[in-house]
Image (cartoon, grey):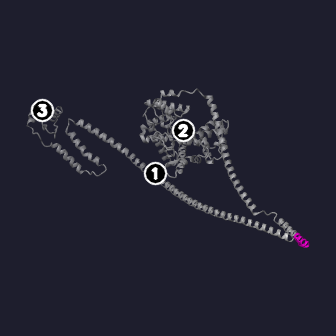
Amino acid sequence: PAKGFSLSFQLSTRGYLSIWPASGQLILMNHTPCCTPEDRQLSNTQAPLTIPKPLYLEQLESYLKKELQTLDLTEKSSQELKLQPYREIFEFFINDFKTYKPLLLAVKNEYEATLAHQTKTIRALEPLKTMVTTVSEAYTQQIVALQEKEKDEINMLKQEKQHLLKCLDNMKEENAFLRTQVEHLKASLAKEYTHNLKESKARKRLLAKLNDAYGEQLDATRHQVQDIKGEDKVEFTLALKVAQRDLTNAQMKLNAMIADYRDVVPRSDFESLEQKYSDLLQEMNTLQKDFDQLHKEQEALLETHRETTEERDMLSTELQRARHNCTPRPDWAKCSEVIHGGAAQWDHLAKGKTSNQLVDVLLEEIATAELRERDVFPGQGTDEQVPVYLRHKGDVKNKHLTKKDVVTLLKDVWNEKIALDEQTGKQSHLPEFFLSYLQKKYGETDAIEWSYNLYENMRFCRSNHILSLFYDVLTGKVGEEEYHSQNQLLSNLQKQLIACDSSDSRVLTQEQFRQEATTLRETFPLKRRQSIQELLDASSYQLDSTGDLVDYISLFEEDDEGNTEPFVVRLRSQYIREKQEYLQQLKNELGDVAEVKADDLKIAFCAINPDVDGQTLDTYIGLAYQLLRQQPEQELVPMETVLEKLLTGDIRQAG
């Protein structure tokens, strides 16, 4: 502090600089540069301890105050107008102090250049601000529209739910009414049974009385015969003739009745036969239903047998090929020595993996470790064959992105591209859009750096579905339709499961969960029973601790790194496997030919899939021939080329 005070005092005495309003220090004014130290010391002792503000300072402050009062600070550029009086005051100060003028002028010029640069930057950013505002409003409108659309759909579903509940109530009332009728009929039947039982007993009593009367009549006749034994034999002869004549008449009447009622059966026999016929008819209907059910089951078993036979043949072929190409099984435990994380990490990665999958995991771990150690990526040049998003000379800095960062950014790229395609009405090319997205988000300079970092992470992380699928679409290995098709497939299945949940509770009971196989067969009618069972096995682990409920929404969830549940992984793997099997059937149908025409390809598609429609068939043919020829059906294309192009599209069994 003493040294600082001394320097300030020397500048004040030599350069006419005042240190006002510092207290406790001597202020020297109007000294000539040639005065001696003794004179300065004498003057210091004679100067008062406090003096008024310097006149020049008061003049500058008065001028500044007057200029500021004349300005209109309500205008948009009021800050620039307010700066002008200060600039003039500073220029006066520079001009009056000749000794410090070069330094002060350099300071002023540097500030002026910085202000000009900042103003230019602000003006350049104003259009971006307007564009951001416009885009924000557009997306806000889209969000509101989607909310309205979902609101209408929710209301429709609620109305449908109310209608179904009303139908359920009506059916319950009808069931109660039918039960009442059944009870009434049971009571009537019991009453009729009691009445018939009483009549049967009365008939038995009447027959007993008739038998008694007949016995009494025989006894009386016997007594009469004994009484008339002594009567005249002539009377007996006449009586015998009359009896014979009556017997002849009775016999004639009996014969006539037998002839007339030959085809008539007793009512009791008729009713007995009718009841027996009714029972036999009911039994026949039951047996017919059982036969129809057994016939359906036989057809299902025959279909299952056919699928099993095909799968057995395919597995047998794969087994023969594997036996031909097999090598001694490696000791995978050795991989834990080179994997980051040791044996625990390797056990976690290798759990449930085949040898082929373990090779992919090992390569990915090695490549990821190498990627973490690299600081730069070599540029691939600016040739035409280099993709547009990788055209750069020189090294590119490695940003060491995490898998979470890459997944988040790629999801945003898909969302932006889908929104742009819906807005323009046509599908944009992913490589060009990918580069334009990065340029818009990070600027022209950093876009290539981000592009290389994302590309290298996608190239090495093949086990992650989001990264691998984006890489395949970006490099042209598969078409963009496969991404949209898989998302639509998952969306349709999720809607089917939500429809099964009448209580909107996000969970299904065990009974509803057992019926999930029916839902899967309705959503995927062409899947084999084994594939359906694989999906059920993959989803069964979601049962809660009580084993009564399953959270079906969690089957479709994924973490921050894009890792999905086993159910979705199995569904996507089946999608790829079914497409490969479909193309293998197409290849077998075409036979061992080196080249194929479009007409032959159409015939082969119709042979293996008769239910395919014309529009889908034209799409497949256009994909195979890339729509580059005016008459593709007259051109021959190599078989391998056709299969490779079909493999890039959304090819699947129709029906």
Quick check: 568 left or right of 269?
left
Across and down, in percent, residue 115 comes to 31, 41
- Kindly identify which residue carries mark 1: 142
Residue 263 location (% of width, % of height) = 81, 63
Asked if one can make out residue 533 in the rendered structure from this viewpoint, the answer is yes
Label 2 sits on a secondary structure element that is: loop
The residue tagged 3 is: 34
Which residue lies at the image location 49% right of the left edge and 36% below the top edge? Answer: 458
The N terminus: image quadrant = top left
Judging by the rendered image, the residue that carries numbered circle 2 is 476
611 vs 80, left or right, is right
Seen from the viewer's position, the closer of residues 202 and 587 is 202
Q: How crowded is mark 3: few (under 14 residues within 10 Å), some or many (20 or more)?
A: few
Asked if the stretch drawn in magenta spans residue 324, the answer is: no
* Amino acid type shown at disc 3: Cys
Can see residue 601? no
Residue depicted at 21% across the width and 46% down the height: 64
Q: Quadrant of residue 357?
A: top right
Q: Position of residue 218 (x, y in %)?
A: 81, 67
Residue 149 position (above or below residue 256) = above
Which contiguous range is marked in magenta?
229-245
- Graded by Cα atoms within 10 Å as few (under 14), some (14 to 19) or many (20 or more), the crowding at tag 1 reads few
The amino acid type of the residue labelled 2 equals: Gly
SS class, disc 3:
loop
Quarter occupied by residue 325: top right
Of residues 291 and 279, the one drawn nearer to the viewer in this rendering = 279
Mark 3 or mark 2, earlier in chain: 3
Decide: marks 1, 2 in contact (CB < 8 A)? no
Query: Going 19% across and 47% down the picture, which residue do you hit?
Result: 62
* Quadrant in the picture for residue 485: top right
Foreground: 416 or 581? 581
